[in-house]
Image (cartoon, rainbow, N blue to C red):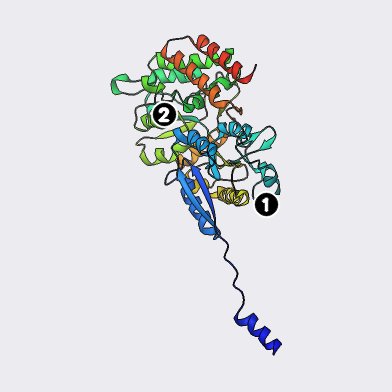
Amino acid sequence: MLCVSAAALSLGTAVPTLAQEPVTLNIWTVDKTGQPTPDLAREFDESEPNIDVVYREVNFADLMSEAMRAYSVGRAPDVFAVDNPDTAMLAANGALLDLTDMIEQSDVINVDEYFEGPMASATWDGRIYGVPKATNTIALYYNKDMFEEAGIEEPPKTWDELIEDARILNDPENDVYGVAFSAKASEEGTFQFLPFVQMAGGSYDNINSEGGVEALTFFKTLLDEGLASPDTVSRTQWASTATFNAGNAAMAISGPWEINRMADEAEFDWGVTLLPTPAEGSPRSSAMGDYNWVIFSSTKHPEEAFKALEFFAEQDKDLFERFGQIPARNDIEIPPTGNEAKDEALHVFLEQMQYSQPRGPHPQWPKISKAIQTALQSALAGSQTPQQALDQAQAQIDKITGK
């Protein structure tokens, strides 16, 4: 009887197991519909029955202020995509989870498979605090039809050649400028200007060097001679490239995020070439953009949050095909798109990536960048000479960095 009763109990009246309560992960990025995170967050949510993902899109201008405000009151997201130069600031202030050990034990994320620049931007004080989300850089778009019509056989290789070509191609009567770029008083302005400083031998903490002055003088020449639109000092990279895309500029300094728009909308033959250097044989440089995936140190679910980072990293192989973004990986070969112009442009940007350098890293990068932006605006507006503007910026940067 006891055996039968025990069997009956085991078969018919077993104590039910309690279902595991789903973990909620909050993920914040600037990505809109059509960009990676909304889709990838949904797919991660669907693949993990015990994880519920809540996604929030944040405007770029509010990204850091919103995140730090939330962190200060204990409501920070678990997973966050931070603009790569701001990673050091968050890490130095203890806001980020140290991922070094988790990455070392991961079968998915391998540091050696990432480009050196993006991984450097995710590292502070010898520890890893982020995983590169994607990467981008800048190069020179040019209107092949305009070049051919003007008898210019190839795009410029040096700064002097760019100025010379811009003078030839500039056509104010038909609302065509020689070149379009952004010198806006924001991180976009620093992003576009700093590579020229680096190519001339300067750096963010040696901004008033001879190379820094040479770079700013180059930018100022383009504005002073009317080879670039007067609103260059106030418009975004997106708006600047729109000028080129509409046929109102012969060249544009911009990034691979524009490839799809160019292929879809431009009504002329276009190409991309490496950023011109100060002189033939000068060192190359370029900006390094995009974001790092980070986990706030306040998260209650570090394992689940890191699982999300691993899932996102596994999708890098399809990042360009699905979303037109370049993975920050050296082990991924992007297959041809079948569009000759797009494939040629992508090839140039991948080559340009080899010369990209991170902004900083430094925990006070926003203040350093602000000093550079102010110098850029002052010189281009004519209120200071390039040397005066950069001397003032250098004094501020020295105070910030403790020199």
Q: Can the viewer see residue 290 in this picture?
A: no
Give the amino acid type for the residue marked by disc 1 in the picture: Asp
Q: How far, Cα to Cα, is label 2 from label 1?
A: 40 Å
Task: Using the rendered view, name the quadrant where residue 327 is placed.
Answer: top right
Q: Is residue 119 above or below residue 22?
A: above
Task: Using the rendered view, name the quadrant where residue 299 is placed.
Answer: top right
Residue at horizontal 62 percent and vertical 77 percent from the top: 14
In the foreground, 345 or 390: 390
Give the residue number, with chain letter if any, for mark 2. Answer: 236
Q: Is residue 69 above or below residue 209?
A: below
Q: Answer left or right for 58 relative to 4.
A: left
Q: Residue furthest bottom?
A: 1
Picture quarter with the C terminus: top right
Residue at horizontal 52 percent and vertical 20 percent from the top: 372
Q: Is residue 19 above or below residue 31?
A: below
Q: Is residue 69 above or below residue 309?
A: above
Q: Residue furthest front?
A: 2
Task: Using the rendered view, name the quadrant where residue 91 is placed.
Answer: top right
Q: Position of residue 297 (x, y in %)?
A: 61, 41
Residue at horizontal 52 percent and vertical 17 percent from the top: 215
Residue at horizontal 50 percent and vertical 24 percent from the top: 190
Q: Number of numbered discs present? A: 2
Counting residues from the start of the chain, the first of labels 2 and 1 encountered is: 1
